[in-house]
Amino acid sequence: MRSKSLPFYGLFGLMRMLYWSQSGDRLAGFPTVKICAIFHKGSDHTRRTRNKWEIYVLFVSGLLQQNTTKLTNYPMKLDLIAFGAHPDDTELGCSGTLASLAQAGKKIGVIDLTRGEMGSRGTMEKREQEAAKSSALIGLKVRKNLGLPDTEIQNHRAFQIPIIREIRRYRPRIVILPPFEDRHPDHGMAARLVSDAVFYSGLLKIQTQSEDGMDQQPYRPLHVLTYMLDTPFEPDIVFDISDTMEVKKQAVRAFDSQFDVADPGDEPVTYISDPAFFETLIARARRYGYRCGFEFGEPFRYSGRPIPVQSFDLLADS
């Protein structure tokens, strides 16, 4: 049973994500989603507040900014792209969040940098099939694989360009990266590569072309977050995935060559194939959710700068 208290976690990072509307007019294109909570769904305070206000909880503070330029020539525009060094990284780190946002009507994409060809289990073809199954479960609009060499990710211009091209094509307001420090070296290298590509995608003199040969315009996402993989960190944001934890389990298990492998067959048992690893994912989601009054949660860091805050009204109202 969830607590009816008003938990605060990463409060200052979350304040700007709460939008109060007296007019009842929903911000165009931004459905209600849940973050670390400020208000519990079952609390008396929440019910009283909803009688007076309609609460729209938006995942990232940038979604609240006004005067956003409307893009008329980008039919494939996405709201958010999550990047992974390997197929299955985003499933482990943020698939509950992606599924929740997709269910709320957001257009979500995943871009895998490599095909995971150096993994001890499975094949590239098998991983591709697993990624397709997982993508359908999560509700992704786009999933791409850039085909960079597994275990050889480097942060240089040749690897930055294909990432810049995808960012300029899909023009997401939010990108989510692997952690900068983690057990697998590829994860940190991928984070640095994509982080730099996000910045460079906004530079006019770095020129790229679309698939049809048209020059692309500079574009830089407003917000960068990192998800957690093996190495824990103290998060700025915990996203409530209580309603999509089962989707996360199914999305991870879609990679059945990699995770929760009861019978390894002729392939080796690995750190991540052991069923105990899968259980730790559930335990971690429960732990971070519990800290915020949720059943399950996914932790994130907000990268590059403090989270913007424009009002302390929430302190007075909570």
Image (cartoon, rainbow, N blue to C red):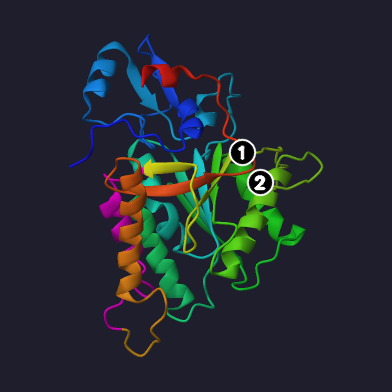
Q: Which quadrant does the N terminus fall into?
A: top left
Q: Which quadrant does the C terminus fall into?
A: top left
In the rendered image, the residue lying farthest to the right is: 205
Q: At 30% from the left edge and 53% from the top edge, which residue is drawn?
A: 286
Instruction: Please tell me the numbered disc located at residue 221.
Output: 1
Residue 187 rendering spot, x and y as whole percentages = 57, 63
Q: Nearer the viewer, residue 7 or 296?
A: 7
Left or right: 134 in relation to 110: left
Q: At 31% from the left edge and 77% from the top edge, which residue is drawn?
A: 261
Q: Is residue 242 magenta?
A: yes
Up/down of 159 relative to 256, above or below: above
Magenta part of the chain: 240-263
Q: Residues within 10 Å of mark 1 (few under 14, many from 20)?
A: many
Q: Nearer the viewer, residue 74 or 182?
A: 182
User: Dot 2 corresponds to which residue?
Assistant: 198
Secondary-structure class at tag 2? helix
Q: Is residue 219 magenta?
A: no
Q: At 26% from the left edge and 21% from the top edge, which residue is drawn?
A: 45
Q: Does residue 278 appear in the picture of this structure?
A: yes
